[in-house]
Image: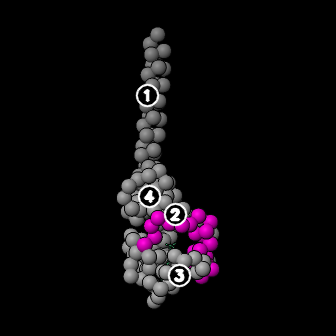
Amino acid sequence: MTKTQIWVAAFLGLFLILFGISYITRVDNSSLTSSPGGDSGAMTPSGSSNAENRNIEQAGKELSAMALIKNNGCLACHGQDLKGSRLAPALVNLKDNWSRDELIAYLRNPSSFMDKDRLKSYKQKYSSTIMPSYSHIDIKDLGKIADYLIRL
Ligand code: HEC
């Protein structure tokens, strides 16, 4: 009987030690992965929809749409919060005028859409600026930008 008790105690002890080790390693992992996500969180606008959370999670490997928009200089013309400046129009309500595919095609070659009346009027209003073509950007990244802009 006492022998059994010793065995039970030994097993319980071993179990506790293993549990402790797994707990410590799990804490280590989460603190490692949370720092890159935290950094990019600062770049995403406030509010936390599921899609934005996904962007933050991906940030370790891929750039979020907002990071791509920043890196490619869109904000310089379209304004810090994409609300427009005297150089270029606000990028809001784009879904009323563009499908995702059209938007990607536009970013790759803006001049091919110049027969649209809205763009013609932009041309006059922002006559000193030209929307550059972004055909050099990876099509997947353009897709991400288009997804993001259409949701604004
Ligand atoms: C050099 C300034 C400049 C930069 C940089 C720029 N744009 Fe533009 N963008 C314009 C101008 C000006 C227009 C208005 C159309 C025109 O005159 O060609 C425009 C139009 C647009 C439109 C159409 C808006 C609408 O209402 O239909 C979209 C979408 C757009 N830009 C997205 C972008 C994105 C995304 C980037 C970055 C990858 C970017 N732009 C970078 C100047 C710029």
Q: Which residues are magenta?
A: 90-112
Q: Residue at x 46, y 10 (%)?
A: 1
Q: Residue at x 47, y 76 (%)?
A: 74
Q: What whole-number distance in Å separates the C-alpha atoms at marks 4 and 1?
A: 37 Å
- Residue 34 in the image, given as x and y percentages of width and height: 42, 54
- Residue 65 in the image, given as x and y percentages of width and height: 50, 65
Q: How many marks?
A: 4
Magenta highlight: main SS = helix
Report which residue position mark 2 lands on. 96
Report which residue position mark 4 lands on. 37
Identity, as a three-letter code, of the amino acid under mark 3: Lys
Q: Residue at x 61, y 68 (%)?
A: 102
The secondary structure type at the circle numbered 4 is helix
> Which is closer to the viewer, label 1 or label 3?
3
- Residue 120 in the image, given as x and y percentages of width and height: 53, 81
Q: What whole-number distance in Å separates the C-alpha atoms at marks 2 and 3?
A: 17 Å
Report which residue position mark 1 lands on. 13
